[in-house]
Image (tube, grey):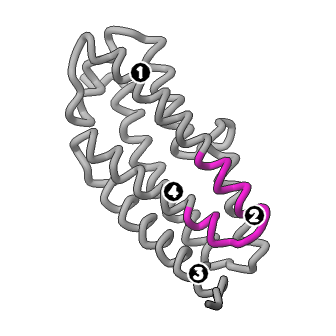
């Protein structure tokens, strides 16, 4: 049996591109928080698949590092959501406005967690995406870099919507 790594890499890249598209576009329009996290997970899985499809050391490193940072962010987010759950249940994204009056340090940590998931540069979630861009650049895939950057911005808009509900007081 002969393995063809270039076809396997193409399949992984195509799967990653489709997962990023489906997750990012559907997360934009989600009102339910659990569905939002599910589509966010689909998009983040696409970034991991794209890093794996690079078939290089920097691509594998970006995939492993992205997975570690994503698990850390998701675990801390779930822990904070369980902490909030004592006071109120959050089913919709807009219900984040309710918890901002209860525990201000928790709100800051939640906002930083969402901003890290979005890949905002000073936070930890930016570094694996930067490694992914470098891995795609080493392969000469300028389309992949532009596409991934555009979809990252689209996903960041989704995360910033939640941060807006957390921080800004709408009257």
CA gap between label 4 and label 1 equals 25 Å
- Which residue matches tag 4? 153
- Which residue matches tag 2? 134
- Residue that appears at 49% across and 54% down: 44
Q: Nearer the viewer, mark 2 or mark 3?
A: 3
Residue 94 percent coordinates (x, y)? 24, 33
Residue 48 percent coordinates (x, y)? 57, 59
User: Would residue 55 be found to the left or right of residue 94 on screen?
Assistant: right
- Residue that appears at 49% across and 20% down: 108
User: Would residue 6 be found to the left or right of residue 35 on screen?
Assistant: right
The local secondary structure at tag 1 comes to helix
- Residue that appears at 62% across and 49% down: 66
Q: Nearer the viewer, mark 1 or mark 3?
A: 3
First in sequence: mark 4 or mark 1? 1
Q: In the rendered image, which quarter is residue 170 located in?
A: top left
Please, what is the dominant secondary structure of the magenta stretch?
Answer: helix
First in sequence: mark 1 or mark 3? 3
Name above or below for residue 48 compared with residue 158: below
First in sequence: mark 4 or mark 3? 3
Nearest the viewer among 65 and 130 is 65
- Which residue matches tag 3? 8
Which quarter of the rendered picture does the N terminus lie within? Answer: bottom right
Residue 140 percent coordinates (x, y)? 74, 80
CA gap between label 4 and label 2 equals 17 Å
Q: Is residue 40 magenta?
A: no
Name above or below for residue 47 compared with residue 37: below
């Amino acid at each position: 049996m002969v393995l063809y790594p270039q076809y396997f890499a193409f399949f992984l890249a195509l799967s990653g591109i489709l997962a990023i598209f489906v997750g990012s576009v559907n997360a934009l329009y989600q009102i339910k928080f659990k569905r939002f996290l599910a589509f966010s997970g689909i998009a983040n899985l696409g970034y991991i698949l794209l890093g794996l499809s690079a078939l290089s050391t920097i691509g594998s490193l970006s995939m492993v590092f992205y997975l570690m940072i994503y698990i850390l962010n998701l675990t801390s987010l779930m822990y904070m959501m369980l902490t909030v759950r004592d006071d109120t249940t959050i089913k919709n994204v807009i219900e984040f406005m309710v918890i901002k009056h209860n525990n201000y340090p928790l709100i800051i940590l939640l906002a930083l967690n969402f901003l890290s998931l979005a890949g905002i540069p000073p936070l930890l979630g930016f570094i694996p995406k930067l490694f992914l861009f470098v891995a795609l650049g080493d392969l000469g895939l300028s389309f992949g870099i532009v596409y991934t950057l555009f979809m990252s911005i689209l996903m960041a808009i989704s995360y910033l919507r939640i941060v807006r509900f957390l921080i800004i007081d709408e009257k």
